[in-house]
Structures are given as C-alpha cells and as structure tokens.
Amino acid sequence: MSNRFFPPKKIDGVGTFQDAGPLQNDPLISALSEVAAIFPLVEEPDFMVSLGTGAPGRTGGKQSMSVSGPLSLWKDGAFPRLWRMFWERMRDRHVKQVFRTHPRYHRLDTEFDGEPPRLDSTKSIDELKLKAQEDHSVTKVIDNIARCAIASRFYFELGSVPEGCNGEYTGFGVILCSIRRGDPAFEGLLDQLSKSSATFYLNNCPILGTFGDRSFISKDGNFRKRVELNLNGRFTISLKQGDSEPCNISGSPYSIEKLITAQGLNAHFGRADHGKRKRSADGDLPTRKRQRI
C-alpha cells in the first residue's frame, strides 16, 4: 500500500490529503475525463493502455494493509479513510469491469504465484524483470497495442464541405499520416504496411490501392490517400494489417458535422484561431493568391 511509504499530510485550514494509489491505482476514469475535456469533438480515445505492476494470483492470499500517520485513529485516521476508499473502489471496480471488455482497452499485467513483493523490496527487481519478460500471456495484448498504435498514426480530413441531401453526403476527403516525409520512420512504416498487405476500409469496404503505389503519396512526398464519400453522416475508416482484425484510424468513427466544425469549414467569416479556411479544391492543386485591388 502506498500509504505505508507516503503517509497522509494535514494542511491547517484545508484538510487531510493522502496518496491516491489505494483509491485509484488504475486512473482510467480520470484519464477519460481529461480526454473529454481536451478533445470535446472526439467521442473516445484511439486506444487505452493500462500498465499494471503485478497482482496476486487467483489462489493467492489476501493482501495485508498497513498504514500509519500522526492523526487520531477514530477521528480522521487510517480506518475511516480506508473504509471510505473501500466503497469507492467497489464502485470503481464495476466501471473497470465494463472497460475490460471494450475493444480499445488494453491491460498489461502479470500475476504472481503468491503475494507480490513489497514496494520497497529492491532485491526483487531482477526477479520482476525476468517474470515480465517470460510472461507470454501479454504477447497477444502487446501485438494488439502495436497494431492500434500504427493505425492511430493515420487520420482523415475532409477535402471540402460535402454536399448533403436527405441525410446522404457526397464529397471527398484524404487519409493523412502524422509521420512526415523526412522522418526516418516514414519509409519503414510504409514498407512494413506494404509487406503485410495492409488495406484501408471505409465502412467495412476496402479502399482501392496498395501501400507503395503512387496513389498513396502526394506531390510533396507525404502520405495522402484520397477517399470518395457517398454515405450518411457517420462512417468508419479502419486499417487492416495482415490477417489481424482491422483497427480504427485516429478519430474514427467520424461524423460529417463534427469534421466540418473541427476543420473550420463552416467558418465563413474566418476561424477563431485566424487560420485559413480550406478551399473546396483538391489539396494537391496549386492555388493563386487573391489579387489585391
């Protein structure tokens, strides 16, 4: 328990504070709240990785709790605080159980045959490293995380405001890559995807073209794949690598309305950040500056 090494602190006139580890050792809910606040137009993160530090096996004994502090035992001491944390953890545990079945949630952890070593047991470091390296149960999870991380390098932008009629939209957009030409990882990424016969999918339908041909590269040498749109307001773009399950690219699934707002395509009098509104023409075509009068 972290309270054993980081005892509670009392600030006069403010209250008592303690390390949040016992209450929320896996701060998933806090992280999701931050994502919602920072990226209000994004429905959910591309993927979530939860890193554990080991847990007792299912046949292991009960973990002991040992806390200390200068406070009164029955006023605001260890037992009342741990009692409140117990109920909070029960609520938090149910939320975690829901997320563990979520396809974007990935948990990396290992189980011990008995009790985990103490937090201050430096002699156990080599043993812990070896156990993590030999735990093959996390191999599949790591492979899934790697595929999600690669897919999240790609994102979609509208090329212009789509034409809408009766809930159907017609237009085009482009799939771009956050790794730019000149980055040492750029060629390696495209080569890896080409060897695995990777394919983009629009609403489960493959997008024509293969990694390595010129339809995936813009005139400036960066990644750029044009996508024709003829769909309703929501759509999904995913990347299938080899025989694995497709992974959504960054921000997918998309909403036409949210993309228009995020890109400022509806800012007819200029955007709040004073950025230029994208023209309706294809991004590869050169545009001339407006002549001054």
Image (cartoon, rainbow, N blue to C red):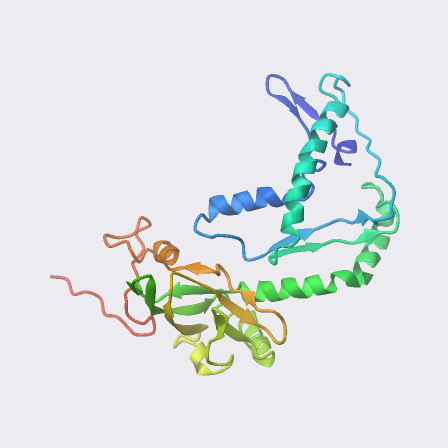
Task: Give the quarter of the image for residue 92.
Answer: top right
Q: Is residue 103 above or below residue 238?
A: above
Q: Is residue 17 left or right of residue 152?
A: right
Q: Is residue 187 left or right of residue 138?
A: left
Q: Quadrant of the C terminus?
A: bottom left
Q: Nearer the viewer, residue 186 or 194?
A: 194
Q: Please name the residue shown 43% across and 51% down the image.
A: 41
Residue 99 location (% of width, % of height)? 63, 50
Residue 20 in view here: no
Q: Quadrant of the N terminus?
A: top right
Residue 218 in view here: yes
Task: Please tell me how many numbered marks the rendered image carries.
Answer: 0
Q: Please name the residue shown 56% across and 76% down the image.
A: 198
Residue positioned most to the bottom: 213
Q: Is residue 4 left or right of residue 42?
A: right
Residue positioned most to the left: 293
Residue positioned most to the front: 166
Residue 96 location (% of width, % of height)? 66, 46
Residue 207 location (% of width, % of height)? 46, 76
Residue 89 location (% of width, % of height)? 69, 37
Q: Is residue 222 above or below residue 15?
A: below
Task: Give the quarter of the image for residue 232.
Answer: bottom left
Q: Nearer the viewer, residue 26 or 254?
A: 254
